[in-house]
Image (cartoon, grey):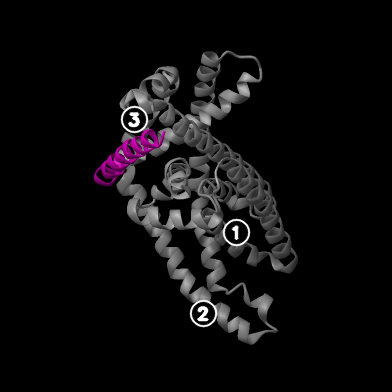
Amino acid sequence: MKDKRNLAAIYVSAYALLFLITCIIFNTVLNVFVFTLISVLIVNLITKLLKILKLKTKSAIIVGLVIYFFLIIYGIILIIPAATEQFGSFVSTINYVFENQSWKTYLEKNPELLSGVNNLMKWLQPKLNDLTNYMLDNIAKGTPSFFVTIFYSILLTIYTLLYSSWLKKSLPNLFPKKIRPQIEKFFEKVYSALSSFVDVVIINAVITAVAFYLLSSFYFKDTAVILSFWAGITNLIPIVGVFFEYIPVFLFSLTLGLKGFIIVNIFVIAIHLGLFVIFVNVMKMHLNLNPVLMIISIIIVNQIFGLVGTFFAVPLLIFIVAYWDEFVKPKFET
C-alpha cells in the first residue's frame, strides 16, 4: 500500500510539474485552462440544478451549456455598452472625491487623524490612476490573445462536458494500472473541492453584484452598472478581491454625507461578513483551507503568472492541500 501511494505521489507531482512549466512558458495555456475549468464547473452547477427537474444528465449538460453561453452573450450585450458609457462618470466621481477632499467633512474635529488621512489619500490617488491605466493598457494589448483564449476555452468547455464520461475513464490510463484506484480517489477529492469552491464563489459574486446594483441604483445611479460589474468580477477572487471592490464604493460613499456614508458601508460590510462565513465553512467541509493560506497563495501565484494567477491561485492551493492530505501527511504520520 505504501509503495502504491509513493508511486502515485511521484506520478501526480511529475504531471503537475510538467503542466506548471508549460503554463510558465506559454501563458495562453494557463489562460485557456483557467477559463475552461471555471466554465466547466459553472455549467456543472447549472446541470445539478437542472437535474432536480428530472432532466437526464446529457440533456441537462446541453441545456446547461446553452444557458451558460446565453448568459455570457446577453451579459456582454447588456453590460459592456452600459459600463463603457458609465466609465467616464466613474472616473469623474473618483477625481471629484480627491480634488474636493470629501473626507474632510467627517474628520474636522480630529485634525491629527485628518492629516494622516490626507497623506494616505495623496498616496492612494496616483496608485488608483496607475491601476486604471494598467488595466486599460492590458485590455488593449491583450485583445488578440483574449479572443484566442475565449475561442479555445469555448471549444474545450463544450467537448469536455459532452465527453466527460469518456475523459473520466481515459485519464487514469495515464498512470500505471496498479495505482489507478489511488489516483481516482485523489482526483475525485480535488474535483469535489474545486466544484464546491467555484459554486460558492460564483453564487457569492452574483449575490454581491445584484446587491451592489440595487444599492448603487439608489445612491450612485450614474455608475450602478460599472460598480455592480466590478463587484461581481472582483468577488471571483476569494478574500483579496473584496478589498479591490470596496475601494471605489468607499470613496463614492464619502460624497453622500454622514448618514449615507454609514448606511452604504454597513450594508457592504454586512453582505461580505455573511458571504465570508459561508465561503469559509464550505471550504472547511471539503479541505482544510483557511483564509491565511488563500491570501499567501494568491500573492505568490500572482507574482508568477500575473493577473490570471489571482484566479488560478486557490484552485492550485486546493490541489496542493489535497496532495498533502493524500500522499505527504500519511507518510509524516508514520
On residue 66, the disc is: none
Q: Is residue 6 left or right of residue 71?
A: left
Q: Give the range drawn in magenta.
A: 1-28
Q: Which of marks 2 and 1 is nearer the N terminus?
A: 2
**Vertical placement of residue 95 versus 289, above or below:** below
Cα gap from disc 2 to disc 1, whole angstroms: 20 Å
Extreme residue in the left direction: 25
Please tell me which residue lies in front, 290 or 135: 290
- Residue 233 magenta-highlighted: no
Question: How many numbered marks, from 0 up?
Answer: 3
Q: Residues within 10 Å of mark 2 (few under 14, many from 20)?
A: few
Quarter of the picture holding the N terminus: top left
User: Which secondary structure lies at badge 2?
Assistant: helix
Cα gap from disc 1 to disc 3, whole angstroms: 35 Å
Q: How crowded is mark 1: few (under 14 residues within 10 Å), some or many (20 or more)?
A: many
**Vertical placement of residue 107 versus 140, above or below:** below
On residue 249, the disc is: 1
Q: Mark 3 points at which residue?
A: 152
Amino acid at pointer 3: Tyr
User: Which secondary structure lies at badge 3?
Assistant: helix
